[in-house]
Image (cartoon, rainbow, N blue to C red):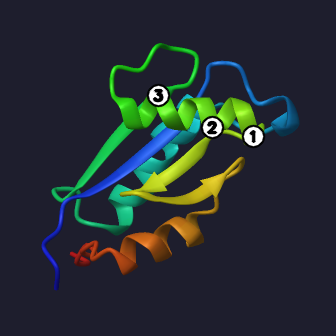
Amino acid sequence: MKNTKLKVTVYGAEQICASCVGAPGSKDTYEWLQAAISRKYEAEDIGYEYIDINQTQAEEKHAAFVQRIFKEDLFYPIVFVNEEMVAEGIPRLKTIYQSLDKNGAVLRLEA
């Protein structure tokens, strides 16, 4: 098994995406993903990051992607596992789990 540090990054905003009315907010999705992932995978090797697209970004890669969100009218929240975009708009756990598996996330052992 790989012993790799994984990073789940969620880009979003306080205001719900205009095309995603009725969906949970980005911050709620971020918290939900943390809870769902921690129930299935060992938490030590998975880090989480929330990027508010309406705030100034200090890190260049985040600033560049935020510009892309606005330029291409992408739906948010947008979820990345490491450097791979795995969800846009309403995320599906199955897709995110598949990416975590592919990147070596360790499943929790049943007690």
At 60% across and 30% down in the image, what residue appears? 67
Query: Which mark is first along the chain, 1 or 3?
Result: 3
**Quarter of the image where the N terminus is located:** bottom left
* Image position of 22 with respect to 3: above or below: above
Task: Give the label on residue 72, or none.
Answer: 1
> Residues under labels 2 and 3: Cα distance?
9 Å
* Image position of 70 with respect to 30: above or below: above
Q: Nearer the viewer, residue 31 or 10?
A: 10
Q: Nearer the viewer, residue 87 or 27?
A: 87
Considering the numbered disc 3 on the image, is that residue within a helix, a strand or a loop?
helix
Which residue is the site of mark 2?
A: 68
**Quarter of the image where the C terminus is located:** bottom left
x, y percentage for residue 71? Answer: 72, 33
* Callout 2 touching callout 1 (CB < 8 Å): yes
The kind of residue on which mark 3 rests is Ala
x, y percentage for residue 14? Answer: 62, 19
Which residue is the site of mark 3?
A: 63
Q: Nearer the viewer, residue 28 or 111?
A: 28
* Image position of 33 with respect to 15: above or below: below
x, y percentage for residue 11? Answer: 53, 36
Considering the numbered disc 1 on the image, is that residue within a helix, a strand or a loop?
helix
Determine the image quadrant of residue 39.
bottom left
x, y percentage for residue 91? Answer: 64, 55
The kind of residue on which mark 1 rests is Glu
Query: Which mark is first along the chain, 3 or 2?
Result: 3
Are there few (<14), some (14-19), or many (20+) residues within 10 Å of tag 1? few
> Residues under labels 3 and 1: Cα distance?
14 Å
Determine the image quadrant of residue 75.
top right
The kind of residue on which mark 2 rests is Arg
Considering the numbered disc 2 on the image, is that residue within a helix, a strand or a loop?
helix
> Residues under labels 2 and 1: Cα distance?
6 Å
At 54% across and 30% down in the image, what residue appears? 27
